[in-house]
Amino acid sequence: MLCMFTHIKSDFVWPTVKRKNIDGTRHYVDGDTNVYHSVTKVTGSIPNPGLDAWKERVGDDVAKHVMIKAGLYGTRLHNYCEDHLNNETITFKDIVSRAHFEQITPLINDINNIHGLEVQMFSKRMGLAGTVDCVADYNGILSVIDFKTSTKAKPEEWIEGYFLQSTCYALMWEENTGQKIDQIVILMSGEDITQTVFIKDKAQYVDRLFEVIAKYKLDNSV
Protein backbone atom coordinates (compact mmCIF):
# COMPACT_ATOMS: atom_id res chain seq x y z
CA MET A 1 0.00 0.00 0.00
CA LEU A 2 1.40 3.39 -0.99
CA CYS A 3 2.02 5.77 1.91
CA MET A 4 1.30 9.45 1.36
CA PHE A 5 3.80 11.57 3.24
CA THR A 6 3.10 15.13 4.35
CA HIS A 7 5.68 17.81 3.49
CA ILE A 8 6.15 20.94 5.61
CA LYS A 9 7.09 24.06 3.67
CA SER A 10 9.81 26.08 5.39
CA ASP A 11 10.15 29.86 5.28
CA PHE A 12 13.92 29.43 5.39
CA VAL A 13 15.79 29.15 2.08
CA TRP A 14 19.25 27.63 2.33
CA PRO A 15 21.95 29.71 0.58
CA THR A 16 23.75 27.82 -2.17
CA VAL A 17 27.09 26.17 -1.50
CA LYS A 18 29.08 24.53 -4.27
CA ARG A 19 31.47 21.60 -4.11
CA LYS A 20 35.11 22.39 -4.78
CA ASN A 21 38.14 20.11 -4.76
CA ILE A 22 41.08 21.57 -2.88
CA ASP A 23 44.27 19.50 -2.93
CA GLY A 24 42.19 16.53 -4.05
CA THR A 25 39.76 16.76 -1.11
CA ARG A 26 36.10 17.75 -1.27
CA HIS A 27 35.25 21.14 0.18
CA TYR A 28 32.35 23.56 -0.26
CA VAL A 29 32.31 27.27 -1.08
CA ASP A 30 29.44 29.71 -0.55
CA GLY A 31 28.58 32.94 -2.36
CA ASP A 32 30.80 34.92 0.01
CA THR A 33 33.74 32.60 -0.90
CA ASN A 34 33.80 31.06 2.58
CA VAL A 35 35.37 27.58 2.40
CA TYR A 36 33.85 24.69 4.33
CA HIS A 37 35.16 21.22 5.08
CA SER A 38 33.00 18.25 4.09
CA VAL A 39 30.92 16.80 6.93
CA THR A 40 31.43 13.31 5.53
CA LYS A 41 35.20 13.72 5.36
CA VAL A 42 35.44 15.08 8.89
CA THR A 43 33.20 12.52 10.58
CA GLY A 44 34.74 9.73 8.51
CA SER A 45 38.23 10.62 9.71
CA ILE A 46 37.90 8.92 13.09
CA PRO A 47 39.50 5.50 13.64
CA ASN A 48 37.29 2.53 12.88
CA PRO A 49 38.92 -0.65 14.26
CA GLY A 50 36.25 -2.93 12.80
CA LEU A 51 36.60 -1.53 9.29
CA ASP A 52 40.39 -1.48 9.49
CA ALA A 53 40.51 -5.12 10.63
CA TRP A 54 38.21 -6.13 7.75
CA LYS A 55 40.39 -4.33 5.18
CA GLU A 56 43.49 -6.04 6.52
CA ARG A 57 41.76 -9.42 6.40
CA VAL A 58 40.43 -9.22 2.83
CA GLY A 59 43.18 -7.09 1.26
CA ASP A 60 43.12 -3.68 -0.41
CA ASP A 61 41.85 -4.82 -3.82
CA VAL A 62 38.87 -6.75 -2.45
CA ALA A 63 38.06 -3.98 0.04
CA LYS A 64 38.09 -1.35 -2.71
CA HIS A 65 35.81 -3.45 -4.92
CA VAL A 66 33.32 -4.12 -2.11
CA MET A 67 33.27 -0.46 -1.04
CA ILE A 68 32.65 0.78 -4.59
CA LYS A 69 29.77 -1.68 -4.98
CA ALA A 70 28.38 -0.75 -1.57
CA GLY A 71 28.58 2.93 -2.52
CA LEU A 72 26.50 2.26 -5.64
CA TYR A 73 23.83 0.37 -3.69
CA GLY A 74 23.84 3.07 -1.02
CA THR A 75 23.33 5.84 -3.57
CA ARG A 76 20.46 3.98 -5.19
CA LEU A 77 18.84 3.31 -1.81
CA HIS A 78 18.98 7.04 -1.06
CA ASN A 79 17.32 7.76 -4.40
CA TYR A 80 14.57 5.20 -3.78
CA CYS A 81 13.93 6.57 -0.27
CA GLU A 82 13.73 10.11 -1.63
CA ASP A 83 11.26 9.10 -4.37
CA HIS A 84 9.16 7.16 -1.87
CA LEU A 85 9.04 10.04 0.60
CA ASN A 86 8.19 12.43 -2.23
CA ASN A 87 5.19 10.20 -3.00
CA GLU A 88 6.66 9.34 -6.41
CA THR A 89 6.84 6.06 -8.32
CA ILE A 90 10.18 4.28 -7.92
CA THR A 91 12.11 2.89 -10.89
CA PHE A 92 14.36 0.14 -9.55
CA LYS A 93 17.74 -0.39 -11.21
CA ASP A 94 18.98 -3.61 -9.64
CA ILE A 95 17.83 -6.43 -7.39
CA VAL A 96 20.19 -5.74 -4.47
CA SER A 97 19.37 -2.07 -3.95
CA ARG A 98 15.67 -2.88 -4.40
CA ALA A 99 15.98 -5.53 -1.69
CA HIS A 100 17.63 -2.98 0.61
CA PHE A 101 14.77 -0.56 0.05
CA GLU A 102 12.00 -3.10 0.54
CA GLN A 103 13.72 -4.34 3.69
CA ILE A 104 13.74 -0.96 5.44
CA THR A 105 10.44 0.33 4.01
CA PRO A 106 8.60 -0.46 7.29
CA LEU A 107 11.12 1.78 9.09
CA ILE A 108 10.86 4.52 6.48
CA ASN A 109 7.08 4.49 6.83
CA ASP A 110 7.47 5.77 10.40
CA ILE A 111 8.60 9.09 8.85
CA ASN A 112 6.20 11.97 8.27
CA ASN A 113 5.92 15.79 8.28
CA ILE A 114 8.98 16.09 6.08
CA HIS A 115 10.87 19.39 6.33
CA GLY A 116 13.57 18.51 3.81
CA LEU A 117 15.09 15.76 1.67
CA GLU A 118 18.66 15.87 0.35
CA VAL A 119 19.13 19.36 1.76
CA GLN A 120 22.53 20.91 1.20
CA MET A 121 23.44 22.84 4.35
CA PHE A 122 26.40 24.43 6.09
CA SER A 123 27.56 25.91 9.39
CA LYS A 124 29.71 29.01 9.65
CA ARG A 125 30.23 28.18 13.31
CA MET A 126 31.70 24.75 12.60
CA GLY A 127 33.11 25.53 9.16
CA LEU A 128 31.45 22.44 7.66
CA ALA A 129 28.99 21.75 4.86
CA GLY A 130 27.22 18.70 3.45
CA THR A 131 23.92 17.16 2.43
CA VAL A 132 21.46 15.68 4.92
CA ASP A 133 19.28 12.75 3.83
CA CYS A 134 16.09 13.73 5.61
CA VAL A 135 14.75 16.13 8.23
CA ALA A 136 11.31 15.00 9.37
CA ASP A 137 9.30 13.58 12.23
CA TYR A 138 10.27 10.04 13.18
CA ASN A 139 7.59 8.43 15.33
CA GLY A 140 6.29 11.95 15.93
CA ILE A 141 9.62 13.58 16.94
CA LEU A 142 11.52 16.00 14.68
CA SER A 143 14.73 14.24 13.68
CA VAL A 144 17.70 14.11 11.38
CA ILE A 145 17.33 10.78 9.55
CA ASP A 146 20.03 8.97 7.60
CA PHE A 147 19.66 5.91 5.35
CA LYS A 148 22.51 3.37 5.30
CA THR A 149 23.32 0.03 3.70
CA SER A 150 25.78 -2.58 4.94
CA THR A 151 26.78 -6.14 4.18
CA LYS A 152 25.69 -7.16 7.68
CA ALA A 153 24.44 -5.66 10.92
CA LYS A 154 27.08 -3.46 12.56
CA PRO A 155 27.71 -2.91 16.27
CA GLU A 156 27.29 0.69 17.46
CA GLU A 157 31.00 1.13 18.13
CA TRP A 158 31.68 0.67 14.41
CA ILE A 159 29.34 3.46 13.32
CA GLU A 160 30.22 6.35 15.61
CA GLY A 161 30.85 8.43 12.49
CA TYR A 162 27.20 8.05 11.44
CA PHE A 163 26.01 9.46 14.76
CA LEU A 164 28.50 12.34 14.58
CA GLN A 165 27.41 13.13 11.02
CA SER A 166 23.74 13.28 11.96
CA THR A 167 24.53 15.35 15.05
CA CYS A 168 26.39 17.79 12.84
CA TYR A 169 23.37 18.19 10.55
CA ALA A 170 21.07 18.69 13.54
CA LEU A 171 23.31 21.51 14.79
CA MET A 172 23.45 23.05 11.31
CA TRP A 173 19.67 23.02 11.07
CA GLU A 174 19.28 24.77 14.42
CA GLU A 175 22.03 27.32 13.67
CA ASN A 176 20.41 28.39 10.42
CA THR A 177 16.68 27.93 10.98
CA GLY A 178 16.39 28.41 14.75
CA GLN A 179 14.48 25.12 14.95
CA LYS A 180 16.02 22.71 17.45
CA ILE A 181 16.46 19.03 16.64
CA ASP A 182 17.39 16.69 19.49
CA GLN A 183 16.78 13.28 17.90
CA ILE A 184 19.00 11.58 15.34
CA VAL A 185 17.94 8.40 13.55
CA ILE A 186 19.94 5.90 11.48
CA LEU A 187 17.97 3.41 9.38
CA MET A 188 20.20 0.59 8.15
CA SER A 189 19.60 -2.31 5.78
CA GLY A 190 22.01 -5.24 5.71
CA GLU A 191 22.60 -7.77 2.95
CA ASP A 192 22.33 -10.42 5.69
CA ILE A 193 18.57 -9.67 5.77
CA THR A 194 18.75 -7.40 8.78
CA GLN A 195 17.09 -4.07 9.35
CA THR A 196 18.26 -1.86 12.19
CA VAL A 197 17.08 1.45 13.56
CA PHE A 198 19.29 3.50 15.87
CA ILE A 199 17.53 6.35 17.69
CA LYS A 200 19.79 8.66 19.69
CA ASP A 201 19.82 11.99 21.50
CA LYS A 202 22.30 14.23 19.70
CA ALA A 203 23.48 15.59 23.08
CA GLN A 204 25.41 12.32 23.50
CA TYR A 205 27.67 13.23 20.58
CA VAL A 206 28.10 17.03 20.56
CA ASP A 207 31.32 17.16 22.62
CA ARG A 208 32.86 14.30 20.66
CA LEU A 209 31.89 15.98 17.38
CA PHE A 210 33.71 19.19 18.27
CA GLU A 211 36.79 17.18 19.31
CA VAL A 212 36.80 15.46 15.91
CA ILE A 213 36.29 18.75 14.04
CA ALA A 214 39.15 20.44 15.91
CA LYS A 215 41.56 17.56 15.21
CA TYR A 216 40.58 17.36 11.56
CA LYS A 217 41.14 21.09 11.05
CA LEU A 218 44.55 20.90 12.67
CA ASP A 219 45.51 18.06 10.34
CA ASN A 220 43.83 19.48 7.21
CA SER A 221 43.98 23.27 7.14
CA VAL A 222 42.34 24.89 4.08
Image (cartoon, grey):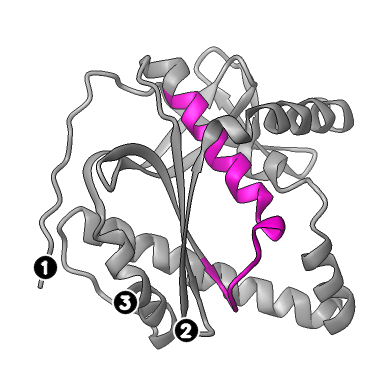
Which residue is disc 3 drawn over? 102
- Earlier along the polypeptide chain: callout 3 or callout 2? 3
In the rendered image, which quarter contains the C terminus?
Answer: top right
Quarter of the N terminus within the rendering: bottom left
Please say if 7 is above or below 179.
below
Q: Residue 193: which numbered mark, if any?
A: 2
The residue segment tinted magenta is: 149-173
The amino acid type, in three-letter code, at marker 1 is: Leu
Badge 1 element = loop
| Residue marked by disc 1 | 2
Depth check: give the residue in front, 30 or 125: 125
User: Disc 3 or 1, which lies upstream in sequence?
Assistant: 1
**Residue at horizontal 66 percent and vertical 65 percent from the top:** 155
Q: Is residue 196 above or below residue 166?
A: below
Image coordinates for residue 121, horizontal then vertical, percent: 46, 30
Q: Which residue is more in the foreground, 10 or 28?
A: 10
Residue at disc 3, secondary structure: helix
Judging from the image, what secondary structure is the residue with disc 2 in?
Answer: loop
Mark 3 to mark 1: distance in Å? 13 Å
Distance of mark 3 from mark 2, alpha carbons? 11 Å
Which quarter of the figure has residue 205?
top right
